[in-house]
Image (cartoon, rainbow, N blue to C red):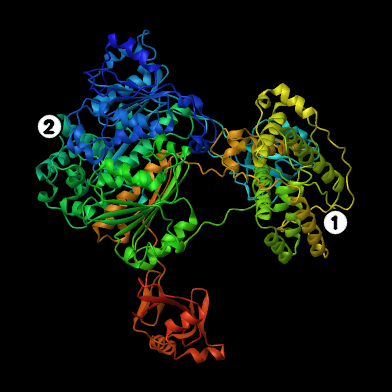
Amino acid sequence: MLTRKREELAGEVVHDLHKKTRADDEPADDNHTMTTGRAPEIDEDLHSRQLASMAARHEAPLRLQRLVSGLNGLGAEIAKNLVLAGVKSVTLHDDDNVELWDLSSNFFLTEKDVGQNRAQTCVQKLQELNNAVIISTITGDLTKEQLSNFQLPQIPLLLDIWNSIKAVVFTDISLEKAVEFDSYCHNHQPPIAFIKSEIRGLFGSVFCDFGPEFTVLDVDGEEPHTGIVASISNDNPALVSCVDDERLEFQDGDLVVFSEVHGMSELNDGKPRKIKNARPYSFTLEEDTTSYGTYVRGGIVTQVKPPKVLKFKTLKDAIKEPGEFLMSDFSKFDRPPLLHLAFQALDKFRNDLRRFPIAGSSDDVQRLIDFAISINESLGDSKLEELDKKLLHHFASGSRAVLNPMAAMFGGIVGQEVVKACSGKFHPLYQFFYFDSVESLPVEPLEPAELKPENTRYDAQISVFGSNLQKKLEQAKIFMVGSGALGCEFLKNLALMGISCNQNGKLIVTDDDVIEKSNLSRQFLFRDWNIGQPKSTVAATAAMAINPKLHVEALQNRASPETENVFNDAFWESLDAVVNALDNVTARMYIDSRCVYFQKPLLESGTLGAKCNTQMVIPHLTENYGASRDPPEKQAPMCTVHSFPHNIDHCLTWARSEFEGLLEKTPTEVNAFLSNPGGYATVARTAGDAQARDQLERVIECLEREKCETFQDCITWARLKFEDYFSNRVKQLTYTFPEDAMTSSGAPFWSAPKRFPRPLEFLTSDPSQLNFILAAAILRAETFGIPIPDWVKNPAKMAEAVDKVIVPDFQPKQGVKIVTDEKATSLSSASVDDAAVIEELIAKLEAISKTLQPGFQMKPIQFEKDDDTNYHMDVIAGFANMRARNYSIPEVDKLKAKFIAGRIIPAIATSTAMATGLVCLELYKVLGGGHKVEDYRNTFANLAIPLFSMAEPVPPKTIKHQDMAWTVWDRWTITGNITLRELLDWLKEKGLNAYSISCGTSLLYNSMFPRHKERLDKKVVDVAREVAKVEVPPYRRHLDVVVACEDDDDNDVDIPLVSIYFR
């Protein structure tokens, strides 16, 4: 139900749209449209992670306007995600006022807001997330006939809603009204994307209609796959083989284009060609190449991603013939048709009785079941043979509640659908999606008395789970590791759920990081005035603002072996569960090991662009996180990066390496020498290798031949570096390996994937080359503390200064060794004279140091990708693009260079919100207790496709020996200060022959070493103290040892960790 706008307000609001404002403190009148914010300009520093996930700049869709109707918890989540995405404007609509009930899921609301309009109350806090987004509110009703009021020409900026808004979202609308509005949107020219989504307790639905014909420009958002051609046959069909540098990702039926093919030039026409018989390193081309030229060398094959046209049904038609439902859990294959019926029955119930079913009311449950039966009977041949009345009971009883985890999950899904509607990027949800998490309910049946409201902010949650589980949530002791994007979402969820909101409960959150500008587009608890402050402290404070009863402690410690005095045994033993909100595998592995050791549930999740995954690690029920790991990413060989790049990633990897070497590592080495010349020389002499020699040479070069005293010196340095990198080195490389060079096996040296390079000629008329010199000179000046003159930003004066540089002619050298071995790990070659050369270099360096001014120090520059004014990315992008130009590799803009060189992990708020919602649905199960492994769910989701894949976790591997069995979750304990012999005897009683005992990295006992038998009658703790230098801290009562055992048949048996409780 949308609102009517008063025409007399139009002029005032249009004026307001041009101003950067905050929301009025005074409530607006009925039908008043509140507008805040300013027209957006895309801030690439702020939205870098989001842009990385979109794989391109999508400025047009970000400028479009959206309408969100219904500011319950789901509507608040959707609006939050859209504002974080940086859309041009969001219009909020709601007729209803805030109730205490709403505080279970809408994080913008407080108890003080009760009685005020929900949409207007949310504006100010939404605006704080992104002041570049124009946020308007609408109150009151709107019928289809009144929509023409939004198309008046005198209020074009006031969101001529059905012309300028390209997507509308409804979170609480009757089916009759939804059909009416959807029909209008579907037939509008151009069509308006219509999305209807509902949360009803542990059940949710989404319906999308993007019009009669909707074009998807990119169905999955992935970069097109490529391959490097090795050969093409003159056949029908033709066989194309590619180099075995990387496996091909093509599939049968894909379209591809060719470029840079020598010989068979007919394929370079840019025409998409279909392939079949796709293999890891070859495919067949559906084309007759018998009359084409003979393939000689080279060639790049690139996947073409054609647009896809989808034809959506209207809601009216889709309700009757829904087609295939988007599945999420194949163990519930028959669930979507039943939920399709259940949501219609609930709509009928609400229309007839003007209310929701009362939680726990058997009469209301039966009424809804009767409605469902009646609707089902009207379906004729399409009716369901059997209705699951138990499921309908759960659906009806909790239908009034909008639960926060469900809102977070669906807010992520719907938020992404809105972006798809306005960008054509990613495949839309087509058309119905139903989901339930009834497994989250307590294992014991709930009595109606447990579901009664208690006049608290948790009443909605109590109506689904009962008051007993609510008490468990409030008394929970939770450890959350990380407070970035995932952490902010988790803290919001936990606060709304009432987790640790009792004095007996406690939420400990730790993160050693501080807030950066790029965090603000996803980590929504942070504001621009928080930049530089500790993440955990700011996030915890913001979470307490959502729920003042949250009992939270914020720490700035990295959870690692070094902080086990902080996170000690007593700390871990006190916990009920651990929630990971981390961004790296190393930290995840450590927390996983701690949870296994102390047998604590771990709720794990992660995101990558539009993808997310969740994993439940439950003691004795599931495998642990470390039980399976992804293979390591393949690294390009060093010789490829330094001499034979064949893609822009190689160029950018090299560029960052050179940046750090020139501007950070060498100045740092200079300072290390100047701070302690004697110690520096001693270290170099002790090393005595090629690396130490090269290091000394770089320091001498920096302080002598390349020392800068004026800014003109810096320009000279930059210009000569350009000549060295992009001309001289290429000339030397092609002199050593000419274009017709052959390998020892007689094959052409410059065969794919190698690309033959060409030297660059420097031109001051080339803006990209001049900008590179400018940026490099500025950073060089920074390392030497040289002021930057104002005239450098004048291109003509800068070009004049560069032209003054005298560039020596290059003469190639004989006998230069260029590393071509892909297995080489160093470019430096050792020499028998290294030690003597090092002595000479040390003497030269000491002499140079005497010519420096007293106290001279350089200023090393650490690479910082997120400051667009510091010239760091200008230098790296310049380095990479000039090198790409050498090798005829397509260049990239600075933003794409930032993604690759800055190793930016694509991230968006929508997938983050979804992941945390899914995890919190599992948290109900963990804290409720008593659930079986089949109740839990691990999830992989990709919002781009969209794909939702949920399955029960894998149980832990069981090891059996005689009548015993154990898993990774088991730990054997022995009480008493025992000797090594007593430990061996204890194991012998279990039919195990121990042959090795270790503590940490030290071997305490091994049966092969005769001298170790002298230790057998010593206390294990004493041997560990003497041999392993282990001092058990006072807070720990035990020592852990790893024992290797065999059975009586000499078969190795992996036994659990053994803990000796000696105190």
Q: Amino acid at mark 2?
A: Leu
Q: Amino acid at mark 1?
A: Ser
Q: Quadrant of residue 417?
A: top left
**Residue 436 seen anywhere in this rendered image of the structure:** no
Estimate how packed mark 1 is, as few (under 14), some (14 to 19) or many (20 or more) residues with alpha carbons within 10 Å.
few
Q: Nearer the viewer, residue 572 or 497?
A: 572
Residue 315 picture location, percent across and down: 32, 28
State which quarter of the image contains the N terminus.
top left
Q: Nearer the viewer, residue 674 or 957?
A: 674
Circle 2 SS class: helix
Residue bearing mark 2:
353
Q: Quadrant of residue 778?
A: top right
Residue lying furthest front: 854
Residue 689 picture location, percent across and down: 75, 63
Q: Residue at x 72, y 57 (%)?
A: 826
Residue bearing mark 1:
744
Q: Are marks 1 and 2 in contact (CB under 8 Å)?
A: no
Circle 1 SS class: loop
